[in-house]
Amino acid sequence: METGKIRSSASASANKSQSRFPLQEQFLQRISSRENQLDRFIPNRSAMDFDYAHTMLTEGKKGKENPSINSSPSREAYRKQLAETFNMNRTRILAFKNKPPTVVEAIPSDFSVAAHQPKAAKPRRHIPQTSERTLDAPDILDDYYLNLLDWGSSNVLSIALGSTVYLWDASDGSTSELVTVDDECGPVTSIKWAPDGRHIAIGMNNSEVQLWDSTANKLLRTLRGGHTARVGAMDWNNHILTTGGMDSQIINNDVRVRAHVVETYRGHQQEVCGLKWSASGQQLASGGNDNLLHIWDRSMASSNAPTQWLHRLEDHTAAVKALAWCPFQGNLLATGGGGGDRCIKFWNTHTGACLNSVDTGSQVCALLWNKNERELLSSHGFTQNQLTLWKYPSMAKVAELTGHTSRVLYMAQSPDGCTVASAAGDETLRFWNVFGKPEVAKTTPKTAAAEPFAHLNRIR
């Protein structure tokens, strides 16, 4: 949904709610003042002369029943004189203290019409079925267990192509090469931006991790000695960089100190391919090629001995790489299984209970939550190589986005939460306006952006 529409409708609803309260209050006051008007007229009996009323009501009847009595002129003259003496010439029988007030309409006509009209339906967000931009991404590794794409908080996208890490600035479309690692170190097997959007961690095939300052284009340090095999998964928790390797180990690295290994999590028997910290930084989810999902609690971490997991979950029947913590419910985790499982599962990480499981029909490679709506985006492998948008919690399909011709292994979300970048084994990088379009993008004219990796000539 377009942000501009959200803001305008929000301000309109705010004005409506502000003006609505006085109307409601006024509506109640008017009903209270008219309670005795709308039901029936109650005469003021203290102002009545019942004898006079009886005489007036029965006199006419007597005359009709006995017309001969009224025929005498003397009797008629006597009746008139008697009426004048006793003030019986009044014509009113029922008397009231005050004249009834003018009827005031309880509900203004325009409000009455509006009240009976159905509520305006929320405009349905238009989701383009094709990518808004497709870029060439040659030499990207077609490896399910790696994580080669990330979008930092400074709106810079990083992607690893073979042994080289490229940076693409989404604000102006400029491209730069951060580093090309040596053959004995590479290829690059994982990348992850630090929360500050400036520093980036690069995991490599030789088990080392490099920390770079992207602004100064400078290598800050290399983390060694933690892993004994390639580092395919990483995530940050403030100054702690958590790394997962093919050696089945998960290590917390404090990048501020020389002895960077501060905790070790042991629970997987095969390669760790998924790592995600919760927003609170208290719980870590890890998935592996052993089909296991672990939930680790930060408070249980110990540097003296391998940390015990909080939950060991064995429901998936294939590798668990896709992990996504829910942005609107802190203890809700979505996970996706590989080709032998094909399921998206939802977990209560406090209790370890599986809340729901949906068979998607194909390998689940990555998961992303919509930050503005209750929606989940999944990317898939064989057979459609599609991105699927689901409504949560019903898990009804909202849209299916196709275009990739190979499994969509990697996804990353822009800082504003609106755009999703996907990279696939077909060596393309695609941008999808699947979660909406920010207001800035609508008002700011598009800058002519140079194609990323344009200097890499490749015949498709």
Image (spheres, helix red, strand yellow):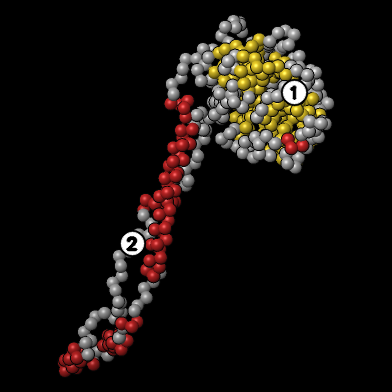
Kindly state the secondary structure of the residue where label 2 is placed: loop
Vertical relation: 457 (above or below) 432: above
Q: Is residue 312 left or right of residue 17?
A: right
Look at 56% across and 35% down and name the residue there.
Answer: 372
Give residue 165's quadrant in the image: top right
Front residue of 205/253: it is 253
Earlier residue among tags 1 and 2? 2
Look at 43% across and 53% down and name the residue there.
Answer: 21
In the rendered structure, find residue 104 and report the number of the disc placed on it.
2
Kindly state the secondary structure of the residue where label 1 is placed: loop
Q: Is residue 443 visible?
A: yes
Question: Where residue 236 sits: x, y (%)?
Answer: 67, 27
Q: Is residue 37 left or right of residue 318?
A: left
- Which of discs 1 and 2 lies nearer the camera? The answer is 1
Give residue 145's quadrant in the image: top right
Vertical relation: 187 (above or below) 14: above
Q: Mark 1 = which residue?
A: 259
